[in-house]
Image: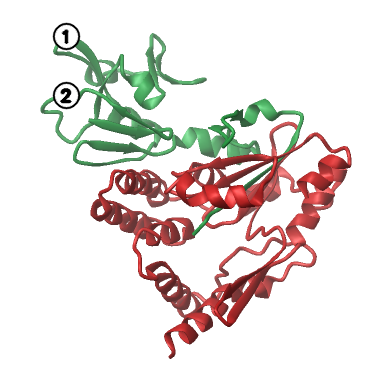
Amino acid sequence: MLVLANDESTTVDSLPDAGPDLWVRTDQLPEATGWELKPEGACLDELCVPLLGDEKTEWVQEHRGAQWLKYSALADKVGQKYVHDDDVWSLGTVPHARHSTLGSGFAPDFEVTDRDGRAIRLSDLRGKKVLLVTWASW
Amino acid sequence: MYSELTAAGHDDFVIISAAQDSQGEAAAGKLFDKANVTYHCIVDATHKISTLFGWVNVPSAAWIDEEGRIVRSNEGVYAGEHTIKMGVASMSFGGTAFADATRDWVQKGADSEFVWSAEELREHLKPVSDDTLLADPTFKLGVHFVNDGDGERAQRHFADAQRLSPDNWNYHRQGWTHKSGGHALRMWSKKTKAMRENEPEKAYYDPMGLPGEDVKQSSQVEWIWTTLWRKLRGS
């Protein structure tokens, strides 16, 4: 199974008979999705979503000697959209990353590598005026 | 503009230029090479920057101040006037309004009259529906299958993304580029014609609200293309 998220594609194990849901092994979760399972809940950077009530038992389960998270349920909870075509799952931008920042007037942070191989993180450019431009060859 | 401003001592000014090109370096590389610039150039195959900033067309741009705030965000932000020649015909578009305003912002910072408040930014944000959000992973699935050599599956997902986010020119135009034989130009003419007829109040680019801006010209871009296309087809 392939997970497309954050500009990366990661091959992960799939859970047989998972039905329409996306289950991801919790040890493969950070690399594939950016999320991590912690005692306080499912966390993405500073955002932590507590697993409440039945969520803990329904979303986190042991199968085949490994721990799995029902990722599609977490995505539904935080409003992250996803779509799949057979065993390729594509995850949208987590709304938290986009909306809260745009609504507050702050630019959403991102990390990219430029054509010279230099890593650029927008938040590292504090103290500078940044003109961010998009264009296309088409 | 970049070299002029940095040479004038504005070394706190940074440009990040992000090509929204699903074919990556193969599509955008030679144009970057030709431009031969010293600022940050990135190839953004999944259009992640457009998604994060809510942009639906190119060129688009944001000014981000020293504290990380967006103090202006516009589409149709050409650096100057451009002319495209196609045989005997040619078309001009763009203008210097945005570049002039940017120069003013770099020089004056928060005192520039073109800087937006947080309230003005909120007023300019496009509404985001559930369908718009779903279009993002759907488009990315299309990009994945294009790069995986499965054009048929890719087209299916591009079509879904276009249906989910009908006003997103990036999803439309990028998806169309993956079919050859003038398909992209034909589809563009068709969609802009439909927009003129059914939604005449809509502009191809949202007006920037800057002095010297040729608002008429930004909505004329597709007119010129249509005329040119008819001429090429001999009709």
Q: Colour of chain A?
A: green
- Give the x, y percent position of residue A61: 21, 15
Of residue B108 and residue B31, the one placed in the foreground of this image is B31
Left or right placement of residue B19 versus residue B38 in this view: left
- Which element is circle 2 on? loop
- Seen in the picture, residue B27 relative to B183 is either above or below; the reply is above
Q: Residue at x 38, y 19 (%)?
A: A30
Return the mark for residue A15: 2
Q: Residues within 10 Å of mark 1 (few under 14, many from 20)?
A: few
Same chain, marks 2 and 1? yes
Q: Would residue B54 be visible to someone looking at this image?
A: no
Which chain's residue wears label 1?
A: A
- Classify the position of the C terminus of chain B by image quarter: bottom left
**Residue B87, image x, y percentages:** 55, 79
* In the image, farthest residue toward the bottom: B235
Q: Kindly give the residue lying farthest to the left in the view shown.
A: A17
Residue designated by label 1 = A65
Chain containing mark 2? A
Mark 1 belongs to which amino acid?
Answer: Gly
